[in-house]
Image (cartoon, rainbow, N blue to C red):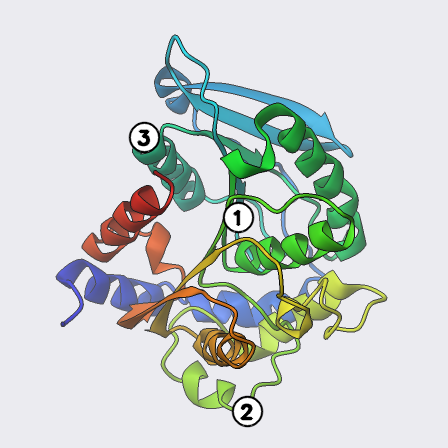
Amino acid sequence: MKPSIQSRLMIVAMRLGRVKHFCHSLSRLKERPLSMKPGAPHKSYYRRFDISSKQAQGRNVWTLSPKSTQTPTKAILYLHGGAYVAQFLGAHWRFIAKLITATNRTVIAPDYPLAPQFTVRDVFTQMLPLYREMVEGFSAENIAIIGDSAGGGMALALAQVFRAEGLPQPERLILLSPWLDVSMSNPVLPELDKRDPILDIHGLKAAGEMYAGDLSVKDPRVSPIFGDCTNLAPMSLFIGTRDLFLADCRAFYRQLAVQKIPIEYHEVAEMLHDWMIMPTPEAEEVLSEIQSILQ
């Protein structure tokens, strides 16, 4: 099936907007850091949802719930993308709003520490206590973890650490265009780089090294494709064929198949990076699939 007009226009818009050039420039972040102003939901969202925030390790953790007389008993831990260096974007908040409406769940959205000022160690220092608190409030079987791009890689890495820490697995892991290997060492990447209008190998490699800090870029906490995926929560993964991360997602899928670890793997032709959170018909189909998974 051909991609929708909206999706084709999105590819053109990404190229005209020089998004790939911006991604390439991430290698200069140490000299010119991005703005660290915390991302926050637009004020209009307060009319649609019950919204609160609290501090955890000096960072905002946002809680958004449907306006209802009954408090939801199920939750989503949402981990936003941004190459571990960028804050929430408007697209993330719009996707969160759609998740709440589709699933009738509370969404917990942490403003996690970003590189280069912070590293993966700081992220896990925030995320482990947050997950423990969520388990106490909702119980693990009522918590789904959804992450896009860097957030998708983080979701898988966290599940591996939860198991190592003796914490219960969540109900589900839903990985959207996940960044599974920050080493950017897959030999197929240069060919995919030509087709991806958003991501850039050079910039992402630098961002991944900053996020890793004193750890190897192939440490599973940084690149969960190198971690043990036995006895994790059920997984669903969505990826497009115009996405630089396609190579590692395919490798991950094959790796799980060899180990006989089940995964719901969705590969959609001609879709670009993070298309699931964009305003396209194909993104609405993913939202419907997520709604079905989390019923």
* Residue 92 seen from this side: yes
| Mark nearer the N terminus (3 vs 1) | 1
Q: Residues within 10 Å of mark 3 (few under 14, many from 20)?
A: some
Q: Pointers 1 and 2 in contact (CB under 8 A)? A: no
Residue 272 vs residue 2: left or right?
Answer: right
| Mark nearer the N terminus (1 vs 2) | 1
Q: Quadrant of residue 108?
A: top right
Q: Residues within 10 Å of mark 2 (few under 14, many from 20)?
A: few
Q: Which circle marks residue 101 in the picture? A: 3
Taking depth in this image into account, of 234 and 219 the one nearest to the observer is 234
Which residue lies under the disc numbered 2?
187
Number of labelled discs? 3
> What amino acid type should be assigned to the residue bearing mark 2?
Pro
Residue 118 vs residue 183: left or right?
Answer: right
> What amino acid type should be assigned to the residue bearing mark 3?
Thr
At horizontal 79% and vertical 73% (from top left) the residue drawn is: 216
Residue 114 vs residue 87: left or right?
Answer: right
> What amino acid type should be assigned to the residue bearing mark 1?
His
| Mark nearer the N terminus (3 vs 2) | 3
Which residue lies under the disc numbered 1?
80
Q: Secondary structure at mark 3?
A: helix
Residue 131: x and y in percent read 67, 37
Q: Nearer the viewer, mark 3 or mark 2?
A: 3
Taking depth in this image into account, of 290 and 38 the one nearest to the observer is 290
Residue 275 vs residue 84: left or right?
Answer: left
Residue 36: x and y in percent read 66, 43
* Residue 30 seen from this side: no
At horizontal 57% and vertical 44% (from top left) the residue drawn is: 170
Residue 269: x and y in percent read 26, 74
Q: Nearer the viewer, mark 3 or mark 1?
A: 3
What is the quadrant of the N terminus in the image?
A: bottom left
